[in-house]
């Protein structure tokens, strides 16, 4: 068979997860930086592709189709992505990974993901990548950031939950394949689903929010956004972190934990005296 079964994928992830927790800090940071850049590039490409599409449904579909290649690139490069690393709950529950090492991975990878994504956001917003369509892409970017900075706390948690449930599903499906095409395809559809549905991904938002904020620092972008009726006053670091990044991260963690627990309980855990399968 050209694939691993789910019990095999789960068992394989225990070994892979333990290795993740034992990476030197400099590798966590560099691979986390790489992952942040990849996801941010997926974000900016999807915005560029969809910014001038009038139909919301078509724009969401295009965004999902374009963005979804990002997770496959993360998997194939062995980059470290905070949301996917929610799966480290599995080796922790199996008592193969130590909790302090799991937390260390999450902390350093999250910081590095943020740095990579914000670097891309600054480069795009401050150096002219948003000039498309007579600055229409800049207005789209600011409007998108305004929406993310205005989302309700509980909506951000729920949308973050379902987003990362799908991301972790994508990691598992990718891990079931033996070759690169299989890995990319496995990761593709769950991510396309969450993006098309408008669910919230903390690492992608580390591009979308800052890109909109940086765009408001460019006077002509800000002026055109105001003329277009965008609520630019909402686009601040405080709103982005407090109203979006924090609750979305909480939701992402909970969604990843839910998926991880299902995989662990079904395929690894000795349940009511039954043997592991």
Image (spheres, rainbow, N blue to C red):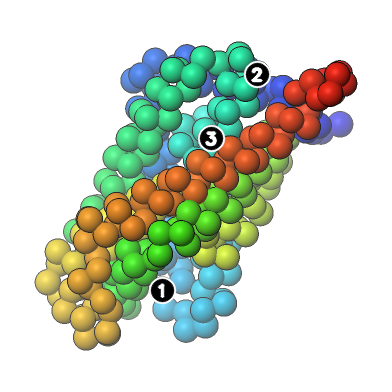
Tag 1 secondary structure: loop
Asked whether, in this view, residue 268 is left or right of residue 153, the answer is: right
For numbered disc 2, what is the local secondary structure? Answer: loop
- Which residue is located at x 34 percent, y 34 percent? 112
- Can residue 53 be seen here? The reply is yes
Q: Which residue is mark 2?
A: 94
Give the vertical position of 178 relative to 190 (above or below).
above
Q: Is residue 147 left or right of residue 157?
A: left
User: What residue would you read off at disc 1?
Assistant: 51
Local packing at callout 3 (Cα closer than 10 Å; few below 14, some 14-19, many 20+) is many
> Which comes sooner in the sequence, label 3 or label 1?
1
Q: CA distance from mark 3 to mark 1?
A: 31 Å
Among the 4 quarters of the image, the one containing residue 214 = bottom left
Question: Which residue matches tag 3?
Answer: 86
Q: Quadrant of the C terminus?
A: top right
Residue at image point 36% right, 28% down: 108
């Amino acid at each position: 068979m050209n694939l691993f079964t789910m019990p095999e994928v789960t068992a394989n992830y225990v070994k892979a997860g333990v290795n993740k927790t034992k990476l030197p800090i400099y590798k966590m940071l560099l691979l986390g930086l790489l992952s942040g850049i990849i996801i941010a590039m997926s974000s900016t490409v999807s915005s560029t592709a969809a910014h001038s599409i009038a139909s919301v449904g078509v724009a969401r579909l295009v965004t999902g189709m374009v963005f979804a290649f990002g997770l496959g690139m993360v998997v194939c490069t062995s980059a470290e992505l905070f949301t996917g690393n929610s799966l480290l709950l599995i080796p922790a529950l199996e008592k193969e990974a130590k909790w302090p090492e799991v937390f260390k991975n999450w902390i350093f990878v999250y910081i590095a993901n943020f740095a990579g994504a914000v670097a891309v956001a600054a480069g795009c917003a401050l150096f002219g990548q948003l000039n498309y369509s007579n600055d229409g892409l800049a207005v789209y970017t600011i409007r998108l950031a305004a929406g993310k900075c205005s989302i309700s706390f509980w909506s951000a948690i729920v949308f973050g939950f379902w987003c990362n449930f799908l991301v972790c599903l994508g990691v598992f499906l990718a891990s079931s394949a033996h070759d690169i095409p299989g890995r990319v395809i496995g990761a593709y559809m769950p991510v396309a689903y969450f993006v098309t549905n408008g669910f919230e991904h903390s690492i992608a938002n580390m591009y979308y929010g800052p890109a909109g904020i940086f765009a408001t620092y460019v006077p002509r972008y800000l002026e055109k956004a105001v003329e277009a009726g965008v609520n630019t006053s909402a686009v601040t670091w405080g709103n982005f972190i407090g109203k979006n990044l924090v609750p979305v991260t909480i939701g992402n963690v909970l969604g990843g934990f839910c998926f991880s627990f299902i995989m662990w309980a079904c395929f690894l855990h000795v349940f009511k005296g039954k043997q592991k399968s």
